[in-house]
Amino acid sequence: AADGVRPRPGWVRPAWPRTAGHRPPSPPARYDFQVGVPDVRLFPYDTWRRLVAAAWRAGREPGDHADPAGHPDLRAAIARYVAYARSVRAAASDVVVTSGAQQAFDLVARVLVGPGDVVAVEEPGYPPARDAFVAHGARVVGVPVDAGGLEVSRLPPRARLVYVTPSHQFPLGTAMSLPRRLELLAWADANDAAIVEDDYDAEYRFADRPLEPLHGLGSG
Ligand SMILES: Cc1ncc(COP(=O)(O)O)c(C=O)c1O
């Protein structure tokens, strides 16, 4: 970071670069509870290498400027995956591949958020998402979260956009209840607001079957 620039208190990135082969300072923790740090030893590198080599041999990689929305085969595979894993109805053309969630928040904000617009986020919530909306001039308002998820009755009426993590609330880990999901969708309809559903960690479940994403429950 530039001199004098400090990360926000309360959101501190891992202290070491996330590059392969780089290890945390010794002694290594027996159980590492840091957020957002996967165990890269579990990645199937051999399979990955084989598949990448096969794709290159088959000459299926574009040699010039590729579509900025992502590789067509990847977009189609993601559309298939979210259909069976999350009941999301999407064609490949609906999928935009980004380099991480932050770029996705930025693109959403460019389209939907203007200076002074009210954006509602969960409190506690995911600070980098809040920062992306602030960077586009939004007035970000934190809305409390209880055991059922974001308290819809406490949303500011003028919110243009609501950012939520219904599958796995960040940082509390709870799932938004079905009644609360329906309440949020009805609220957004009535107030002409958009919902950004960050389907964060939907694959991690401690019990029961997953709940329908807001995307599948809503009318669009
Ligand atoms: C709520 C939430 N959304 C999205 C992400 C994914 O972020 P990225 O794609 O930048 O790794 C994280 C990662 O910690 C997260 O906590």
Image: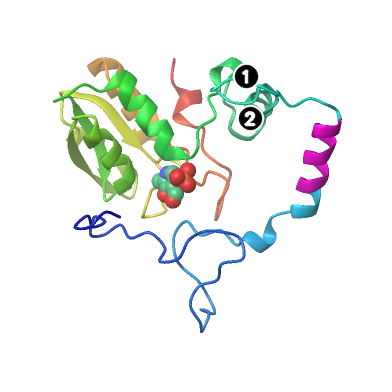
Residue 168 visible: no
For mark 2, does the 10 Å Cα neighbourhood hold few (<14), some (14 to 19), or many (20 or more) residues? Answer: some
> Dot 1 corresponds to which residue?
92
Amino acid under disc 1 = Ala
Question: Which residue corresponds to the image point at 32% horizontal and 34% vertical from the top-left?
Answer: 163
Q: Is 170 drawn above or below residue 215 in the view shown?
A: below
User: Is the C-beta of the residue carrying label 2 under 8 Å from the nearest atom of ligand 1?
Assistant: no
Question: Which residue corresponds to the image point at 27% horizontal and 26% vertical from the top-left?
Answer: 161
**Label 1, label 2: how far apart the Cα atoms are:** 7 Å
Q: Is 86 drawn above or below residue 190 in the view shown?
A: below
SS at circle 1: helix
Looking at the rendering, the stretch of residues picked out in magenta corresponds to 48-57
Question: Which residue corresponds to the image point at 20% horizontal and 42% vertical from the top-left?
Answer: 142
Residue most extreme to the bottom: 27
Quarter of the image where the N terminus is located: bottom left
Q: Position of residue 2 (x, y in %)?
A: 26, 54
Magenta-colored stretch includes residue 56: yes
Q: Is 208 drawn above or below residue 108 in the view shown?
A: below
For mark 1, does the 10 Å Cα neighbourhood hold few (<14), some (14 to 19), or many (20 or more) residues? Answer: some
The quadrant holding residue 4 is bottom left
> Dot 2 corresponds to which residue?
78
Amino acid under disc 2 = Ile
